Amino acid sequence: MKLINWKDDFLKRVVIIGAGASGMLAAKVASDRGYKVIVLEKQKRCGQKLLITGKGRCNITNNCEIEELIENVPTNGKFLYSAFYTFTNDQVIDMFNDLGVETKTERGKRVFPVSDKAVDVVRALEKQMRSNKNVEVLLNSKVDKIEAQDGKVKKVILSDKREIECDSVIVATGGVSYPRTGSSGDGYKFARNLGHTIIKPKASLIGLEVMEDYVTDLAKLSLRNVSINVYNSKNKKIYDDFGEMEFTKYGLDGPIIKSASCRMGDLSKENYKIVLDLKPALDEDKLDKRIQKDFLKYQNKSFKNSLNDLLPQKIIPLIIRLSGIPEEKKVNVITKDERKNLVNLIKNIKMEIKGLRPIAEAIVTAGGVNTLEIDPSTMKSKLIANLSFAGEVIDVDAFTGGYNVQIALSTGYIAGSNI
C-alpha cells in the first residue's frame, strides 16, 4: 500500500471526496482557514454535474428571501436553516460576481450567469479553489473506503490501494442521479460503513411516463407559457404550475413537469393525472372568441387547416383527433357545441401518469444520509468526530429554481468552515 504524502505535514489535513459545487467550495473555505486540503475526484474534471444543470446554463441560486428558500426544500428544509443563513443566496451571487461571473435574475427569481454558460460557473469555482496553495486536486481518483478507529476517521483508501492519512474528511459525493457525472452513490456506502443510516434514494425532479401512447408522435415538441394541474386518485389538485414543458417518446419532461414529479407520492400506491392547458392566458370565453375569429378567417377551409395560427403544427393532428371533429369538415359548418368542446379540449388535455423515469435521469436524488445524524450548524457527523457531509449526499432535496445548487454551496461552505 502506497501512502500519498502531504506537502506541508505541519498543517491539519483534510480530505474532501467529490469536486462538485459543495466539494469545491468546502475546499476553498477550509484552506482559507489554514488547513491543508486534498480533493479527490473520480472523474477526469471538476464540476461535471454542474455543467449539465439548467440545460447547460446552471441556475446557481434563487433570489428570494431565506424563508422562501427553506419552503422550497420539501425534504428536511428546516435542517438547512443554519446553512442558508450562514452562506446566503445574496452571498452566492456576490461570490460569483467577484469571481467575474456576472449574473442575471429571470422569471421565478432564478439566477443564471449572464453568459448562459454553466462552464463559466465551474471554471470560477475551480479557479477559486485552486487559488490557495494549500489545496491539491487529484482527478481520476476513486475512493474505495474511509477507515475509522475509535470513533474517528484515520485514513482514506483509494481503489488503486493508495492511502491518505488525514485529520478530517468531508463527503461531498452527490447522490445517484446522472451517474456518468460521477454521482453513483459512493457516499452512501462510505456513510453506511461508518454507522450512518441511509434514507433510501429515489428520483426527484424527473420526467414522467404517461399511459397515452400519442405522446410518441409529439416527441421533442417543446411548449412555452403553458400550465398544468396535477390531481391525485381522489381528484384533489395537489399542484399547479406555469412555464415550459416538452413531450418525449415516453411522456412528459421539462421544468414544470420535473417540479410536478417531486410533489407526487409513491406511484405504486397512488394514481395521478396531469391536465395540460395549452392557452392559460385565455379563459374559455376569450379562447372561444379567438377560435371564432380564426374560423371566420378560414371559413372556407377544412378544419385541419384552421388551427395553424393558434397551436404548434406538431400538436394539431392530436387536437383534431381528440376533438372528434372530422378533419375535412368545412369550418363554416362546425357547430357551436363542437367549437365549445374544442375550447374545453385545448384547456384540458388529460394524461394519466404511469411512472417516473429511471433514477439515473433525475436532476436530484431524494434520500441520503439521515439528517438526524448530522449537526445542522456544522454539517459534522454526530457519530464520527471528524467526518462531515455536504451537498446531495445528505437527505435534502428541493424544487427546481436554483435551490439545489444553493443547498450544495451553503452546506459546502458550512462544512469547510467547521472542520
Image (cartoon, rainbow, N blue to C red):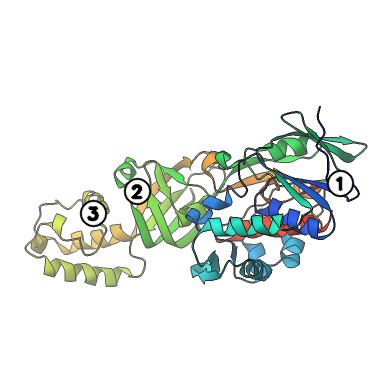
Mark 3 Cα shell of 10 Å, populated few (<14), some (14-19), many (≥20): some
Gap in angstroms between the C-alphas marked 1 and 2: 48 Å
Residue at (66% x, 57% y) in the render:
127
Residue at (14% x, 51% y) in the render:
326
The residue identified by callout 2 is: 220
Q: Is residue 79 in view?
A: no
Residue at (74% x, 59% y) in the render:
413
Gap in angstroms between the C-alphas marked 3 and 2: 15 Å
Task: Find out whether the residues at labels 3 and 1 contact each other: C-beta distance under 8 Å.
Answer: no
Mark 1 Cα shell of 10 Å, populated few (<14), some (14-19), many (≥20): many
The residue identified by callout 1 is: 386
> Could you tell me which secondary element the residue under label 1 belongs to?
loop
Give the side of residue 361 with respect to residue 398, left or right. Answer: left
On the image, the x and y values in percent for residue 129 come to: 70, 56
On the image, the x and y values in percent for residue 410 come to: 71, 60
On the image, the x and y values in percent for residue 167 come to: 87, 45
> Of the numbered discs in the image, which one, if any, rests on residue 316?
3
